[in-house]
Image: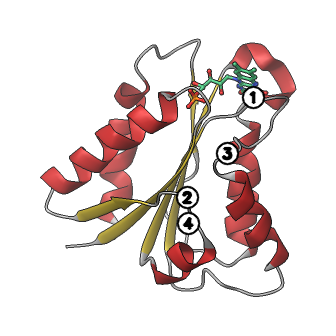
């Protein structure tokens, strides 16, 4: 059984709803999952496995509810604070935004790799133009990600 902490970036609730579905799915498979509310570095440091689920806002920007944590993590970038932790990144976006498609998820992906996270599955980008229901795209990715824990 693995223990997973979810970090969610959401403006209008799509990523939040997805995170709830993912949490249920993880728990149904016998693992434990908690969504970090108002996430801080303490949540990061105490997590065994981290799953980021973030939409993109503005022009490739990280939603405000996740941004303070990401900025704090960026300030730690000299330190391999994610060594030994498995991290997954699920990015919600909309390809009609062009170059900034899934920009928040891409920033988080780069950051966690700088911090020496163990990345077992490549980041999943979910395009709102293709998936009305993002969970459909995430479920198979999640199965693979969980197998490594
Ligand atoms: C104001 C605004 C700006 C957005 N900017 C981007 C963007 O730069 N890149 C992208 O891939 N998606 C962008 N999106 C699409 C959202 O990421 C997408 O709709 C997502 O599902 C929203 O999830 P949320 O409700 O959790 O925030 C934007 C949406 C809005 C409303």
Marks 2 and 1 sit apart, C-alpha to C-alpha, by 25 Å
Closer to us: 6 or 118? 6
- Would you say the beta carbon of the disc 3 residue lies within 8 angstroms of ligand 1? no
Q: Residue at x 67, y 79 (%)?
A: 116
Q: For the point 13% across and 62% down, which residue is it?
A: 30
Which image quarter has ligand 1? top right
The first of marks 4 and 3 along the sequence is 3
The residue at label 1 has a CB less than 8 Å from ligand 1: yes
Counting from the top left corner in percent of width and height, residue 83 is at 59, 85
Which numbered tag is attached to residue 134?
none
Camera-side mark, 4 or 3: 3
- Looking at the image, is 53 positioned above or below residue 130? below
Please state which of residues 37 and 34 is positioned toward the viewer in this rendering. 37
Question: Does dot 4 land on a helix, a strand or a loop?
Answer: loop
Relative side of 59 to 47, left or right: right
Kindly report the distance in space between the C-alpha atoms of the residues bearing marks 4 and 1. 21 Å
Q: Earlier in the sequence, mark 4 or mark 1?
A: 1
SS label for mark 1: loop
Which of the numbered marks, if any, corresponds to residue 105?
Answer: 3
From mark 4 to mark 3, how far is it between C-alphas? 14 Å
Label 4 environment density (alpha carbons within 10 Å; few <14, some 14–19, many ≥20): some
> Residue 84, image x and y in percent?
52, 85
Q: Are marks 2 and 4 in contact (CB under 8 Å)?
A: no
Q: Are marks 4 and 3 in contact (CB under 8 Å)?
A: no
Residue in front for this viewpoint, 47 or 100 = 47
Question: For the residues carrying marks 2 and 4, which lies nearer the camera in this image?
Answer: 2
Label 1 crowd bin: few (<14), some (14–19), many (20+), radius 10 Å? many
- According to the picture, the residue beneath numbered tag 1 turns out to be 101
């Amino acid at each position: 059984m693995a223990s997973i902490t979810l970090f969610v970036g959401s403006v209008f609730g799509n990523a939040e709803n997805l995170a709830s579905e993912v949490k249920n799915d993880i728990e149904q498979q016998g693992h434990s999952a908690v969504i970090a509310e108002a996430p801080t570095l303490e949540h990061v440091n105490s997590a065994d496995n981290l799953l980021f689920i973030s939409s993109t806002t503005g022009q490739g920007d990280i939603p405000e509810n996740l941004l303070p944590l990401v900025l704090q993590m960026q300030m730690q970038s000299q330190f391999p604070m994610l060594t030994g932790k498995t991290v997954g990144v699920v990015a919600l976006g909309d390809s009609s935004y062009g170059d900034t498609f899934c920009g928040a998820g891409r920033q988080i992906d780069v950051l966690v790799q700088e911090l020496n996270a163990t990345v077992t599955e490549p980041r999943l980008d979910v395009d709102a133009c293709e998936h009305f229901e993002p969970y459909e795209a995430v479920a198979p990715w999640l199965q693979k990600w969980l197998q490594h824990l």
